Each structure stands twice: as structure tokens, then as C-alpha cells.
């Protein structure tokens, strides 16, 4: 009898412990409990300790943290009929725990299928070059379209990232050739630009050198002209000083000295290699002056010139003529 009572007590304790364990739920900070009582939505509980009736209540635990969903490789055809294989990742977050439980049975499966169909729709609107080069645009388009569908499920698609795009082998080979040709073109353009820059720098250097040479020549010409001007001024000052000195000396000389100097000048003119020279009109006056200063010149019996200052007769030995005044021809002319 005692054994039966002990067995009943143990069973009661186990049932009580099981009931207490089923009646107490603990929701963490990032979790929410969606409570159903007799099949009807009774609201959201949590975070913290939640007491429920294990007989009438049923619960669903919802995680509010951001999660990701890997979409396996999907084959899609671009707008220019190029088949490509793409796989990507979806990042999402539950905003409405009740809608995420009531609106969709299996969010992961539903998101996987809607992502595959959305990917084909987005890729079908883009050419192959845009799919390969415009990843950001494709990611943004996928995120917007997926978010429009998952919004009614209480889920927000925060980001979509395409991980890998695999075009067919023929397309990859063509892309390799295109890349090689593009690099060759860039190398040629870079080389041409380098030659152009070198030519421009060389021309600029030559222009600067020509400008410097011209400036140097101009300065040298200016300095030479300035030197010549100063030399001419000095020569003019010297001539002026010499003429002043001659004038001072000439003022103290008598007429006879001037006549002798005049004769000396005529002698030098006659001894020059020139075959033509001019006899001054005042030659008669000159001869009269000479006759006056030479002793005994009046007794030589030579014909005296007229007293009115007329030009004496000049005889040219070469042709026997006697012009009155003017140029005498020939190298052997006598007075």
C-alpha cells in the first residue's frame, strides 16, 4: 500500500514539473513569442518570462535578428540571349512577428522560389555587358522587387548581393579576346599620348630657348648701340675740343702761315693717286699772297695776276688747253 502511494506521489510530482515546464517560456531580447489560445491569435509576448497555459495555448518563437538566405546557382537568359549562371545572397529581417507567422507557412522556401523567378525577370531585362559590369544596379533591382513581395509577409529585405556570374565558355573566350584587344588599344593610346607630350615639351623648350636667344640678342644690340652712341659722343666731344683748340691757335696766326698751310694742302692733293681734283676759285688771291711772302718773287719776271682777283691762267700739260677754273684732268697737271 505504501509503495502505491509513493508511486502516485512520484507521478504527481513529475506531472507537476512537466506542467510547470510547459507553462513557463523565456523569450530572449531578440525573440518574440506569437501566442495562440484555442487556435486564435492572442498576441505577441516577450521578451522575458512568459506564462502560458499548456492545455489551451500554443506558441511560435520568432527571431527578430537580421538573417541571410543563400540562393543556389540559377540559370537565366539575358536580353541578348546569352545564358548565364548566377548565385546570390538575400539578407532579411522580420519586422512584424505576427504577419511572419500568419502570412506565410515557410518563409525560407517561399523566399527561395520568389528569388529565382525575380532573378530571371531582372536578368532578362539587361544585356550581358550590363549584367557583368553593373552589379550594383542589378542588386538594387533585385532588392526592390523582392521587398515588394516579402513586405506583406512582415519581412524586410535589407540587401541582395550577387556573388558569382558564370557566362558560357564561348562568351568567356570572347571576353578574354576583347580584354586583350582593349589592353592593346590602351597601350597604343598611352604611347601616342606620351609621344604627344614629349613633342609638346620639346616644342615648348625650343620656344623658350628662341625667346631667351632673342632677348639676349636684343640686349646685346641695345648695349652695342649704347656703346656706339657713347663712343660717338666721345668722338664728337674730342672733335669739338680739337676744333676749339685749332680755332684758338688759328686766331693767333698771321695770314702768311695760313697761306703756307693752304699750299701744303694743295701739295698733298696733287700727290694723291686721284686723276681728278678741283682747283679753288680763290687761287689768284693765293698766288698773290705767296708772291708777297717769297723774297724776290716780284723780280722773277713772271706774269702777275690781275688785281681784281680774277682766276689766273692754268695750263694743262697733257692736252695743251688752259681752262680758267675747274677740274684738271690727268695725273701730270701743272699750275
Image (spheres, helix red, strand yellow):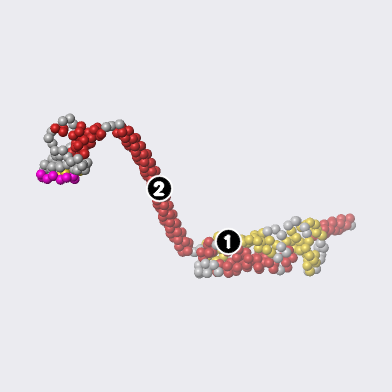
Q: Nearer the viewer, residue 103 or 257?
A: 257
Whether residue 273 is visible to the viewer of this picture, yes or no, is no
Q: Residues within 10 Å of mark 1 (few under 14, many from 20)?
A: few
Tag 1 residue: 136
- Snapshot quadrant of residue 173: bottom left
The numbered mark at residue 233 is none
Q: Nearer the viewer, residue 103 or 135?
A: 135
Q: Is residue 323 magenta?
A: yes
Q: Is residue 23 magenta?
A: no
* Left or right: 292, with 220 as reference point: left
Which quadrant, please, contains the N terminus? bottom right
Q: Residue at x 21, y 35 (%)?
A: 289
Q: Nearer the viewer, residue 88 or 215?
A: 215
> Which residue range is magenta in the image?
319-326
Tag 2 residue: 211
Please identify the residue farthest to the right as the structure is shown. Answer: 1
Q: Height in image: 124 above or below 321? A: below
Amino acid at each position: 500500500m505504501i509503495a502505491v502511494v509513493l508511486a502516485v506521489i512520484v507521478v504527481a510530482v513529475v506531472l507537476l514539473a512537466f506542467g510547470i515546464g510547459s507553462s513557463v517560456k523565456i523569450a530572449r531580447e531578440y525573440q518574440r513569442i506569437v501566442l495562440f489560445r484555442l487556435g486564435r491569435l492572442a498576441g505577441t509576448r516577450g521578451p522575458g518570462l512568459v506564462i502560458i497555459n499548456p492545455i489551451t495555448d500554443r506558441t511560435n518563437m520568432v527571431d527578430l535578428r537580421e538573417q541571410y538566405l543563400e540562393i543556389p546557382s540559377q540559370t537565366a537568359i539575358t536580353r541578348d540571349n546569352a545564358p548565364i549562371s548566377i548565385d546570390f545572397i538575400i539578407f532579411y529581417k522580420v519586422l512584424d512577428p505576427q504577419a511572419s507567422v500568419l502570412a506565410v507557412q515557410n518563409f525560407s522556401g517561399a523566399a527561395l522560389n520568389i528569388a529565382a523567378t525575380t532573378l530571371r525577370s531582372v536578368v532578362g531585362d539587361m544585356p550581358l555587358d550590363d549584367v557583368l559590369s553593373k552589379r550594383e544596379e542589378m542588386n538594387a533591382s533585385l532588392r526592390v522587387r523582392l521587398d515588394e513581395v516579402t513586405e506583406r509577409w512582415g519581412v524586410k529585405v535589407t540587401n541582395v548581393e550577387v556573388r558569382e556570374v558564370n557566362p558560357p565558355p564561348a562568351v568567356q573566350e570572347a571576353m578574354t579576346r576583347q580584354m586583350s584587344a582593349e589592353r592593346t588599344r590602351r597601350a597604343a593610346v598611352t604611347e601616342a599620348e606620351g609621344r604627344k607630350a614629349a613633342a609638346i615639351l620639346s616644342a615648348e623648350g625650343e620656344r623658350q630657348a628662341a625667346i631667351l636667344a632673342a632677348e639676349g640678342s636684343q640686349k646685346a644690340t641695345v648695349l652695342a648701340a649704347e656703346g656706339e652712341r657713347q663712343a660717338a659722343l666721345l668722338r664728337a666731344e674730342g672733335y669739338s675740343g680739337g676744333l676749339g683748340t685749332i680755332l684758338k691757335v688759328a686766331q693767333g696766326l698771321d695770314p702768311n702761315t695760313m697761306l703756307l698751310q693752304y699750299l701744303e694742302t694743295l701739295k698733298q692733293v696733287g700727290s694723291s693717286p686721284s686723276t681728278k681734283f678741283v682747283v679753288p676759285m680763290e687761287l689768284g688771291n693765293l698766288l698773290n699772297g705767296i708772291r708777297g711772302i717769297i723774297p724776290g718773287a716780284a723780280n722773277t719776271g713772271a706774269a702777275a695776276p690781275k688785281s681784281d682777283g680774277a682766276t689766273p691762267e692754268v695750263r694743262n700739260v697733257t692736252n695743251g688747253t688752259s681752262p680758267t677754273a675747274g677740274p684738271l684732268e690727268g695725273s701730270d697737271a701743272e699750275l
